[in-house]
Image (cartoon, rainbow, N blue to C red):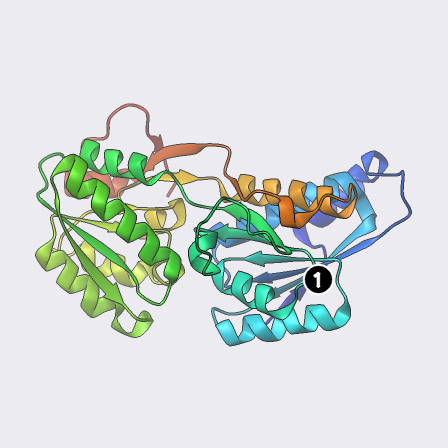
Amino acid sequence: MKKIIATGMAALMAVSMCACSDSGSNDTYNIGIVQLVQHPALDAATEGFQDALTEKLGDKVSFDLQNASGEAANCATIVNGFTSDGVDLILANATAPLQAAAAATSTIPVLGTSVTDYATALEIDDWTGIVGTNVSGTSDLAPLDEQAASIHELFPDAKTVGLLYCSAEPNSVYQCDTIKKILEDDYGYSVEYFSFTDSNDIASVTQTACEKSDVIYIPTDNTAANNTSTIKDIVTTDTYKTPIFAGEEGICSGCGVATLSISYYDLGYKTGEMAYEILVNGEDVSTMEVQFAPKVTKKYVKSMADLYGVTIPEGYEVIEE
């Protein structure tokens, strides 16, 4: 696990924005950040969060950033350390950190980010958009109906769609269950689940998905995001050649053709703005609605589109390779 104290861009912003920071209070704030794993999407969310607060608070805010290396047990250890230290707020970046933070404290404000579905993650019935405890945050869920429409737009002649995801990630299950119904009911696809339990069986499951699918959909899934090279090595071979539509840009850039994705930096920035309202303006976290990314964007990987002969319509941005 690595610990970073207000580093990188956040530190630079602390210096440059100090004169513009909140100067009406002498309070200083210590924020614990637990990030599930190092990955471009999660890294961007953390960066956006730090930048938002540093712009507003300058050197009055410090960050204790720790990485759980993909292990739920590490998440629990990290957040228990935060509660012992008495941090002012916890940022939980991804679902496992959110679950660990929610279990560790009922008093310290907890904000999640890069979490797809709070109701599923926290086992909440009759979801209203508000957790109602010391937990709130932002969701990285892109509109699944728009993702299904993009799949049909790019692959109108496909008959079968395979859903490739990690069964141990509740948010991935939720996304697949939701988009399966849309793909079947609205577009007439035959849809089948292909789930792996961890990185050990991802290659064999991907091979099976390729054999039985015209196109594969991968939701926002942390395990898949950490194994895109393994997936790409399979789906691009002549034996298993099958295009992938991804639920987020990081997975798409690693092994996909196209995505309808959010900006994780913007998502983290919005979470930072929520943190400011809690810390400085005294907003009650228990009444704060879970927020979503301000916009979604259609993107594609040119080399992969060329490989599969997919015609990309207007309105899609190129992902730099």
Left or right of 220, for residue 306: left
Up-down: is 312 above or below 176?
A: above
For label 1, count other residues whose C-alpha is less than 10 Å away and answer few (under 14), some (14-19) or many (20+): few
Position above or below: 38 against 149: below
Q: Quadrant of residue 12?
A: top right
Q: At label 1, which amino acid type do we have?
A: Thr
Q: According to the image, label 1 marks what residue? A: 107
Closer-to-camera residue (178/44): 178
Is residue 75 rendered to the left or right of residue 317?
right
**Residue 186 location in percent, x, y?**
18, 35
User: In the displayed structure, would residue 71 be above or below residue 26?
Assistant: below
Q: Residue at x 69, y 55 (%)?
A: 7
Give x and y (percent) for residue 105.
Answer: 65, 67
Say which residue appears at 59% left-offset and 72% top-offset. Answer: 1
Residue 149: image location, x then y, percent: 24, 33
**In percent of the image, x 23 and y 60: which residue is there?**
233
Residue at 26% across, 60% down:
231
Q: Can residue 218 be seen in this snapshot?
A: no
Q: Nearer the viewer, residue 307 or 100?
A: 100
Secondary element at tag 1: loop
* Above or below: residue 193 compared with residue 302: below
Query: Of 1 and 134, which appears nearest the observer?
Result: 134
Q: Quadrant of the C terminus?
A: top left
Q: Residue furthest front?
A: 126
